[in-house]
Image (tube, rainbow, N blue to C red):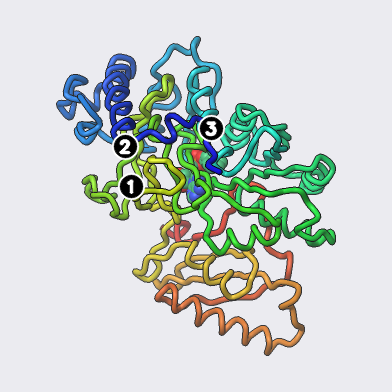
């Protein structure tokens, strides 16, 4: 059984998708040039006029936008519609600098909700489902995004938001939730709490999870699937492009299909800005093709991934993006070696540990240090120091194999690392304090 929410567009041929994109980009560039002085100036500086953009092939002539532009233009500088036509804002959870504020018209919300509805249906959701949305509601886009899609599909929606894990579990069990939507780290926490309460995975009615908003490994997927007794699907998006639903997994789970009738994707070399051929690893750049209020053109996401147009047996011809295994921002350079937190997560879960860990980076006597606190699961717990030390050395060896540098691993007691209800904070880099 193939599951589509908007079959016609989701199964359109490459030629049909391209024709839609070509038509939309011409209108969109004109809309932005006429209404966004900030971007008009960038185009003028580059010597590009709206009439130079006749198809998506010409997108590469346009200037990029980055988070720095969004901060410069805060709050209204990239707004392309009168405020009286906007019905909502959302904002990023950034911890430094000014927040990014994104605006939406009702049309923008409608299209966005279509995108998340496609994701829910692709994961197997129908109007018979009870969807527990435990992404944050409020400025964060996760709650509102999945909530809107769930309504479109006609599911019974439980707008839980994050936190109050006890209450989450009570509603999940009493109201027979069948789909759960939250960050993967919160899903792992809910799974852990269910087990502590003596529930087995088959005691709940959940069958599907739709998880995103942070990097998560395949090992983490297996761990969550096992603890909740579900099939777990990935969903991707960012505030600047609406929120979740820019891309979603189908039943094949071989990358996430990008909703290409709304978003045009490019992969660029993050250092030179050069557009890279299909299959290359690089920074993902999005052009919103029909957003009205906040229509970013060539927005640099900082997410590093690969695009593939290889045929997918689900019937969709939308290009697929690989899981972004961390932003270029998240990459740590430790003693000259590039290290991603996801590599550490892979080793830990493969070695049978839980996804409760914290990475501490510092600089001592001009040398970078890498310490990893890893929680012992109750079954690994031992009061024999030699057992613990043996485990620590074993993990250090496995980490060295994966990372190319040797960290110091510290096993800490069960439950001593704080759990995440939203996006997990995995890395504390103290080097920044010394700079
Ligand atoms: O995280 C939107 C979202 C909500 C996506 C719920 C999925 C589910 P921001 O807070 O603006 O928006 O953060 C966007 O989060 O650039 C990625 O670095 C990261 N991210 C989002 N989804 C994934 C994913 C929301 N599936 C930033 N895998 C993005 C890995 C993800 N990273």
> Circle 1: is it few (<14), some (14-19), or many (20+) Cα within 10 Å?
some
Residue appearing at x 43%, y 70% in the figure: 368
Q: CA distance from mark 3 to mark 1?
A: 21 Å
**Element type at mark 3:** loop
Q: Which residue is label 3 attached to?
A: 5
- In the current view of this chain or complex, which residue is farthest to the front? 1
Residue 266 to residue 338: above or below = above
Answer with the quarter of the image where residue 301 lies.
Answer: top left
Residue 92 visible in image: no
Q: Position of residue 92 (x, y in %)?
A: 52, 36
Q: CA distance from mark 3 to mark 2?
A: 19 Å
Q: Earlier in the sequence, mark 3 or mark 1?
A: 3
Which mark, by number, is residue 309? 1
Q: Position of residue 202 (x, y in %)?
A: 77, 57
Q: Which residue is label 2 attached to?
A: 14
Answer with the quarter of the image where residue 288 lies.
Answer: top left
**Element type at mark 2:** helix
Q: Earlier in the sequence, mark 3 or mark 2?
A: 3
Proximity of marks 2 and 1: CB atoms separated by less than 8 Å = yes
Residue appearing at x 20%, y 31% in the figure: 58
């Amino acid at each position: 059984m193939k599951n589509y929410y908007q079959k016609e567009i989701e199964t359109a041929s490459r030629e049909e998708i391209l024709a839609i994109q070509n038509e939309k980009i011409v209108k969109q560039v004109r809309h932005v040039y006429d209404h966004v002085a900030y971007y008009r100036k960038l185009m003028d500086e580059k010597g590009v006029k709206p009439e130079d953009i006749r198809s998506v092939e010409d997108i590469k002539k346009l200037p990029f936008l980055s988070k720095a532009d969004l901060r410069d233009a805060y709050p209204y500088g990239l707004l392309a519609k009168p405020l009286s036509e906007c019905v909502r804002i959302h904002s990023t959870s950034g911890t430094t600098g000014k927040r990014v504020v994104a605006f939406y018209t009702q049309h923008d919300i409608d299209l966005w909700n279509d995108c998340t509805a496609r994701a829910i249906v692709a994961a197997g959701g129908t109007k018979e489902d009870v969807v527990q949305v435990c992404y944050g509601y409020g400025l964060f886009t996760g709650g509102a995004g999945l909530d809107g899609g769930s309504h479109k599909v006609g599911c019974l929606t439980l707008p839980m938001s994050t936190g109050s894990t006890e209450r989450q579990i009570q509603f999940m069990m009493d109201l027979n939730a069948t789909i759960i939507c939250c960050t993967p780290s919160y899903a792992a926490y809910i799974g852990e709490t269910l087990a502590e309460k003596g529930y087995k995975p088959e005691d709940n009615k959940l069958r599907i999870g739709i998880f995103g908003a942070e990097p998560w490994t395949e090992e983490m997927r297996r761990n969550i699937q096992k603890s909740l007794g579900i099939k777990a699907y990935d969903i991707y998006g960012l505030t600047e492009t609406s929120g979740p639903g820019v891309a979603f997994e189908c039943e094949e789970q071989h990358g996430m299909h990008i909703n290409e009738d709304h978003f045009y994707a490019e992969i660029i070399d993050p250092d030179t800005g050069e557009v890279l051929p299909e299959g290359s690893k690089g920074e993902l750049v999005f052009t919103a093709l029909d957003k009205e209020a906040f229509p970013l053109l060539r927005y640099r996401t900082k997410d590093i991934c690969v695009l593939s147009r290889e045929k997918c047996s689900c019937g969709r011809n939308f290009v697929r993006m690989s899981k972004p295994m961390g932003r270029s921002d998240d990459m740590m350079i430790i003693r000259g070696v590039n290290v991603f937190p996801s590599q550490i997560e892979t080793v830990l879960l493969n070695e049978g540990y839980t996804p409760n860990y914290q990475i501490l980076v510092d600089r001592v006597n001009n040398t970078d240090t890498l310490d990893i606190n890893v929680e012992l699961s109750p079954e690994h717990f031992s009061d024999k120091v030699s057992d613990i030390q043996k485990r620590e050395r074993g993990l250090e060896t496995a980490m060295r194999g994966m990372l190319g540098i040797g960290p110091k691993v510290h096993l800490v007691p069960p439950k001593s690392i704080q759990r995440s209800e939203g996006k997990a904070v995995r890395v504390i880099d103290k080097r920044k304090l010394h700079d």
